[in-house]
Image: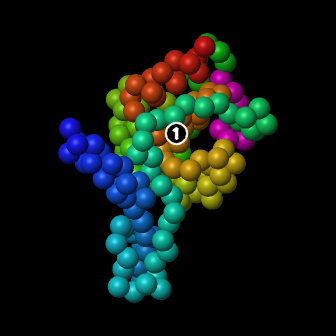
Amino acid sequence: MKRWIILLIACLLSPGHANAAVYKVIGKDGKVVYTDEPPADATSAKELRIQSYSGPAQQGALNAHEDWQAILKRPALSNSGPPPIVMFSTDWCGYCKQARLYMRSKNIAFSDRDVEKDKSAQAQYARLGGRGVPYFVIGQLTLAGFSQDSFDATLRNAQK
């Protein structure tokens, strides 16, 4: 029993992938590459500080002062349809990839906003208080992280 407790404590204290560094490298040909290892030429790399959620997904609500129409850049849908879904993501995030695959497999319409490539997405993400990806806005609710169960529950709650 003590071994399991020690192992659990060691796992909780050891750094995980959620804090791994990601580097944006612009090559001589102008191509952008994202990598988890710094290049030999450190002058051409920029370390990014966007974390991936590794814990359980956390549902929240948008603040009343948030300009939801500006976030979506389209008029609100009527109550008869599904709530609008925006996912703030990155290319390299494994949870983002899982979320995309899941929503596409269920034919769920969503807007995918890359917080590294899109300056307006970065600004919206910061205003919403995003601190990791994926970060969802589903109707008037938010969801930090991804699991199928928590996504489905948040989507159901947003439709009420």
Instruction: Assign the C terminus to one quadrant of the image.
Output: top right
Q: Is residue 99 left or right of residue 46?
A: left
For badge 1, the amino acid type reads Ala
Residue 72 is covered by the magenta coloring:
yes
Secondary structure of the residue carrying numbered label 1: strand
Number of numbered discs on residues = 1
Return the residue nearer the eye: 7 or 100.
7
- From the image, tell me which residue sits under label 1: 144
Q: Is residue 124 visible?
A: no
The prevailing secondary structure element of the residues shown in magenta is loop
Residue 2 in the image: above or below residue 143: below
Residue found 41% across the figure and 54% down from its top: 18
Residue 134 is covered by the magenta coloring:
no
Residue range in magenta is: 70-77
Where residue 54 appears, as percent x and y from the top left, is 40, 45
Where residue 146 appears, as percent x and y from the top left, is 43, 37
Q: Is residue 133 left or right of residue 129?
A: left
Q: Is residue 123 visible?
A: yes
Residue found 74% across the figure and 38% down from its top: 66
Instruction: Assign the N terminus to one quadrant of the image.
Output: top left
Residue 130 in the image: above or below residue 99: below
Residue found 40% across the figure and 25% down from its top: 149
Image quadrant where residue 150 sits: top left
Where residue 82 appears, as percent x and y from the top left, is 56, 20
